[in-house]
Structure formats: C-alpha cells, structure tokens
Image (tube, rainbow, N blue to C red):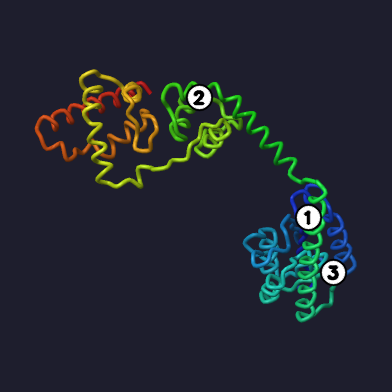
Amino acid sequence: MDGQVVAYYRVSTELQAREGFSLAGQRAAVHRYITDERLELLTEYEEAESGYHPSKVTLEKRPGLQNALRDCKRHKARLVIAALDRLARNVVFIASLVETRIPFVALDIPNATPFMIHIYAAVAEEESRQRAQIIRAAQLIAMARGKRWDQRCRQLAIDARARSEGLRPVIDEIRAAGIHGVYPTMRELQRRNVPHFRGTRWYNSLVRKILEHLGYYEKPTMPWATLNPIKARQRAESIRPYLIELQVEQDHTDRETAAILNERGLRTATGGPWTRHTINELWRRYLRTGGVSASSSETRKTTRALARRRARRKMRSRTKG
C-alpha cells in the first residue's frame, strides 16, 4: 500500500488543459515526491473542470477523479495531488472524499490530518469565493468604461444573420409557394436539398431563428391545441365542402387546394394562410373519421371518395419516393 500511488492533476478550463498551464508544474511536483519517497507510480489522470461550484461539484462530473479513485481501491494505492485545491475548492466535496477512507496526499500539506484537511478546504473555498467577487467587481468597472467581452458572440450573431440573408431568395421562393411556418419551411428545405452550413439536417429551432432574422417569423396566437374542440370541429366541417369540390371533383393536390383557398380569402384558425401541411392536418384531425354533418348518406359517400382519393395520391407519392 505504501509503495504504489496514483497521480491526479486538474486545471479549471479546457483552454488551460490545451495550453498546459499548471499541468507541467503539478506533474513535476508529483514526480519529484515519488522519486524522493521511492514510490511506484501506477497511472496518471488529468482533467479540466472547475473546482468551485457551490452545491454543484459532484464525483459524476469528474470522470478523471473517478478513475483515479477506482484504481486506488483496486490496487490499495494512495492518491497523490500537487495541492489540496487541485482536488477541489469545495468543503462538502472534499469531506465526502475523506469519508471514502481512500488515502490521499496533498503535497502542499503532506502530513495533514482529516481535521486539518477540512480547515484547509474551507480556506480554499473562501479564497475562491473572494477571488470571484474581486473579478466580478473589476469586470463591472471595465464595463462602465466601455470595455466588452462579447466580441466573439457579436461576431457569431453577425455571421448568423449573414447566412440568413444568403438564404432569403430560397425562403422567399418557398413562401411564394404558400408554405409558411417553421416546420413546413424546414420540410421544404429538406425536400429541396438546400445545404446546411454545418453539413447536417435542418431542424426547427434553426429555421425559426432564420425566419426571425429575415423578419418572417410570427409567434402563433391561437394554435389548434388551445381551440375549443367543438368550435374546431365546426370550423373543420365548414371546410369539408371545399375539399370535396377541389379534391374529388377537380382532382387538385393539397398544395393546389391551399392556394385556391387562399385566393378565396379563407384563412386557418390562427389567421395564417393555408398550406399543404395545414390541409393534411385538418383532414387527419377532424374530417377523416367523419363529423356532425357526416350523418347524411351523401356526405358519407363524398367523404369516403375523398379518403380513397387521398390514399391513392399518398401511395403514388411513396412509390415515386
């Protein structure tokens, strides 16, 4: 037990880990201790994680430390760290490690008892808290003098708006075809194979942000889910004759039906224009299973004809795909 040790190094940020800040110093101190004490180094672990988050520092967020403690248990070895604050700057977290009964040595206090470890941990936590207050006060003074820290965020926002403006011709063409809303626009972008700047698929939140940049996004004021169910079905029943006329008698598609309804001045429940998606949603939710006006034989007959016609067109579209 006395001859084998596991080394653990920690820095606060990923940038410090990439640049090697303090890691080299911690490693040199630990290796010097191992050489002087003639110990055997089993393995080393390093990670980038903040050591001070009140009530948020948990072992689950420190996989490197978890692996180091697991090796200490397996080989009955000691954990060696360059300084106690490299373990954490949180009293509760350090106290929980002391309770695990796994021996560890902090080279800044190599002969410390558990009582002394608790005292030093409290001092390290208070030091970190005071340092954060000083840094925050300095930032407020600098901000009052006009200094900004969000240059990168501002540049990212400018780049995002430039990409949105680059897509304006495509979005205008989609809207001219009667396609509005976030989800329908996303589906149309995918159907047209418009490339995503990251090379991934389009998703709702990104399309919504693009529409906001272009000034096309309007927050829904009365979505279908919040309508009175009876009024929603009555409204759908008022649209049924138009669907039968346009799709059964004249054999129009959903897209063509939406365009004709818009030309006739009809609007959806939210006050927006009709699209092929809203036509399909109207059919799926309210008209496919019949309704209050479907009691007559003529209405049932025309509804079945409409259902057969939509099923055939859907089958043809799948076959083409």
Q: Residue furthest top?
A: 250
Q: CA distance from mark 1 to mark 3?
A: 37 Å
* Above-or-below relation of 142 to 30: above
Point out residue 44 in the picture as x, y percentages from the top left corner: 76, 58
Give the labeled residue for mark 1.
Answer: 140
Q: Earlier in the sequence, mark 1 or mark 3?
A: 3
Viewer-side label of 1, 2: 1
Viewer-side label of 1, 3: 1
* Residue at point 35%, 46% (across, down): 225
Point out residue 275 in the picture as x, y percentages from the top left corner: 37, 28
Residue 212: which disc?
none
* Above-or-below relation of 305 to 63: above
- Image position of 96 (left or right of 151): left
Give the labeled residue for mark 3.
Answer: 107
- Image position of 59 (left or right of 134): left
Q: Earlier in the sequence, mark 1 or mark 2?
A: 1
Task: Say what secondary structure mark 3 lies in.
Answer: loop
Point out residue 271 in the picture as x, y percentages from the top left corner: 38, 35
Q: Residue furthest left?
A: 297
Q: Earlier in the sequence, mark 3 or mark 2?
A: 3
Tell me if mark 1 has few (under 14), some (14-19) or many (20+) residues whose alpha carbon lies within 10 angstroms of its own.
few
